[in-house]
């Protein structure tokens, strides 16, 4: 009675990872385009400090969870936001889809979006989407 997994990784159906919490703002990010996957408490504390969140560091169980952060480049003349749209394990990779959006306000911005989700052991890839 063992489960048959079929032909290995390649044929595994896509698996959506559902975040359990997120934090975001239009300012306070690193001011560069990019993202990070955080898998230990030291990096988590460092990230939390760098984005300057007022609340205490949220507890993350890095044995079972990971944190994902995305940033968009600093703009002095345009307020922008960034958000992670989906986390999906597919074709042997964790695809982190994210979207950068221009807001109406003319204000300096360095947006970020940070979330906590179930841990993935797969190599990750950040995928910009519209």
Image (cartoon, grey):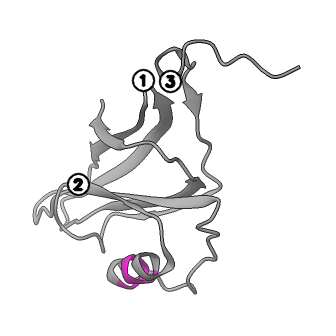
Of the two numbered discs 1 and 2 in the rendering, the one whose residue sits closer to the viewer: 1
Coordinates of residue 9 in the picture (x, y in percent): 50, 24
Q: Main secondary structure of the magenta part?
A: helix
**In the image, what residue occupies the spot 28% across and 69% down?**
29
Query: Mark 3 or 1 closer to N-term?
Result: 3
Name the residue carrying label 2.
Answer: 34
Label 3 Cα crowd, 10 Å radius (few <14 / some 14-19 / many 20+) = few
- Give the distance between the C-alpha atoms of the residues marked 1 and 2, in whole angstroms: 22 Å
Q: Is residue 97 left or right of residue 62?
A: left
Q: Is residue 128 left or right of residue 59?
A: left
The label shown at residue 91 is 1
Label 1 or label 2, whichever comes before in sequence order: 2
Q: Secondary structure at mark 2?
A: strand
Q: Nearer the viewer, mark 3 or mark 1?
A: 3
Quadrant in the picture for residue 71: bottom left
**Stretch in magenta:** 45-49
Judging by the rendered image, the residue that carries numbered circle 3 is: 9
Residue 41, how many percent across, how many down? Answer: 50, 78
| Mark count | 3
Q: Position of residue 115 (x, y in %)?
A: 51, 58
């Amino acid at each position: 009675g063992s489960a048959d997994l079929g032909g290995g990784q390649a044929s595994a159906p896509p698996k959506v990872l559902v975040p359990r919490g997120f934090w975001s703002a239009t300012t306070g990010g690193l001011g560069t385009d990019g993202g990070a996957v955080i898998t230990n408490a030291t990096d988590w504390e460092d990230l939390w400090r760098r984005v300057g969140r007022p609340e205490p560091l949220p507890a993350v169980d890095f044995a079972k969870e990971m944190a994902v952060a995305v940033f968009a480049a600093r703009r002095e003349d345009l307020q922008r936001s960034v958000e992670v749209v989906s986390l999906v394990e597919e074709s042997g990779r964790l695809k982190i889809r994210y979207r950068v959006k221009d807001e109406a306000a003319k204000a300096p911005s360095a947006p970020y979006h940070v979330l906590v989700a179930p841990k993935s052991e797969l190599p990750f890839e950040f995928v910009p989407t519209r």
